[in-house]
Image (cartoon, rainbow, N blue to C red):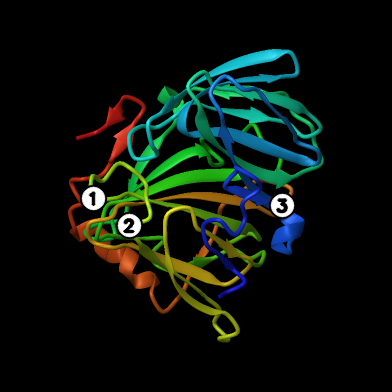
């Protein structure tokens, strides 16, 4: 098994599906937790040296932090709606509670500045259709620079790739400071829908590739619902949704730069593909969701 590919269950912490700190990943900044909230049972989360987003994956929740209360209207699954979210700072004690139960992602970044908590309404989240033809996909820029500026190091976005399509393509990297890229560590957290195109489950699968030009990294893996893939460096992409099984992934990025950025460089062998998208219609299945629900 690849050290970069963490199958569902391999990062679990009790009933929580994912606990991944930067130290456990073997790098400096980026982490991820996925929590399961039992109905009506409050959970206390201490952020320590990490800032985080509180992002409902399924269900809704109430967030209490620094004397503020945020009611996050969530969603049935990641394939049904763009969700409310909240930003919580480092050195905070956060209480999470959900009347009906919920699954909550906490994309995290080790940081130095302590900012104020803040609420992010779903209707304010930009939804972008990127690519063209079979490379069409939805990018939900809830925590990306330019769309959300209230963070020290943390960047995050969600992608939905309709079944049969390719995303994270052309392959790209962000592992050095250059004219076109910045250094970022990146986490991919995958959810794969089943036959109904809405409900995540173990039946479906997709493919993911990460590699370096010198061949030191050359990973081609099948990913399933709940899997995590770590990208410490190198080109990553494509992510391919198998026919019949739409793919979601949460991207979490952070790095040493003073200014947050998700800038990248394409693999020069494949960057030409971007120029072909202007001549191709986007997949009519995109966007899949917005703040009102499923688009179709």
| Location of residue 143 with respect to 232 vertically, above or below | above
- Is residue 244 rendered to the left or right of residue 7? left
Viewer-closest of 159 and 205: 205
Residue wearing tag 1: 195
Image-based side of 291 in relation to 58, left or right:
left
Is 233 situated left or right of 121 in this image?
right
| Residue 187, percent from left and from top | 57, 56
Quadrant assignment, res 294:
top left
Q: Comparing marks 2 and 3, which lies closer to the viewer?
A: 2
Q: Tag 3 or tag 2, which sits nearer the N-term?
A: 3
Which is nearer the N-term, disc 2 or disc 1? Answer: 1
Seen at 56% across and 52% down, the residue is: 262
Vertical side of 118 occupied by 160: above or below = below
Whether pointer 2 and pointer 1 mark residues with C-beta atoms closer than 8 Å, the reply is yes
Residue that numbered label 3 is attached to: 21
Helix, strand or loop for disc 2: loop
Can I make out residue 109 in this image?
A: yes
Mark before the other along the chain sequence, 1 or 3: 3
Q: Which residue is mark 2?
A: 203
Q: Position of residue 105 (x, y in %)?
A: 56, 39
Q: Mark 1 falls on what kind of element? A: loop
* Residue at 28% from the left image edge and 40% from the top image edge: 288
């Amino acid at each position: 098994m690849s050290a970069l590919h963490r199958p569902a269950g391999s990062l679990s912490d009790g009933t929580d599906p994912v606990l991944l700190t930067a130290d456990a990943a073997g790098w400096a900044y980026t982490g991820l937790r996925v929590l399961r909230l039992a109905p009506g049972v409050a959970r206390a989360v201490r952020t320590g040296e990490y800032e985080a987003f509180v992002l409902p994956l399924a269900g809704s929740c109430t967030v209490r932090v620094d004397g503020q209360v945020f009611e996050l209207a969530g969603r049935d699954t990641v394939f049904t709606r763009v969700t409310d979210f909240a930003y919580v700072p480092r050195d905070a004690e956060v209480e999470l509670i959900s009347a009906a139960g919920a699954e909550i992602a906490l994309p995290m970044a080790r940081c130095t500045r302590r900012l104020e908590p803040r609420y992010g309404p779903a209707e304010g989240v930009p939804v972008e259709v990127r690519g063209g033809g079979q490379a069409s996909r939805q990018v939900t820029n809830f925590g990306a620079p330019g769309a959300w500026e209230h963070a020290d190091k943390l960047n995050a976005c969600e992608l939905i790739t309709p079944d049969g399509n390719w995303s994270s393509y052309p392959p790209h990297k962000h592992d050095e400071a250059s004219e076109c890229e910045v250094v970022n560590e990146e986490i991919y957290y995958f959810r794969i829908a089943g036959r109904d195109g809405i409900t995540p489950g173990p039946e479906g699968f997709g493919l993911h590739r990460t590699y370096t030009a010198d061949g030191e990294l050359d990973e081609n893996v099948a990913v399933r619902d709940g899997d995590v893939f770590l990208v410490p460096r190198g080109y990553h992409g494509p992510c391919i949704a198998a026919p019949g099984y739409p793919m979601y992934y949460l991207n979490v990025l952070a790095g040493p730069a003073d200014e947050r950025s998700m800038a990248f460089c394409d693999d020069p062998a494949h960057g030409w593909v971007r120029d072909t998208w202007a001549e191709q219609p986007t997949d009519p299945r995109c966007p899949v969701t917005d703040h009102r629900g499923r688009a179709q």
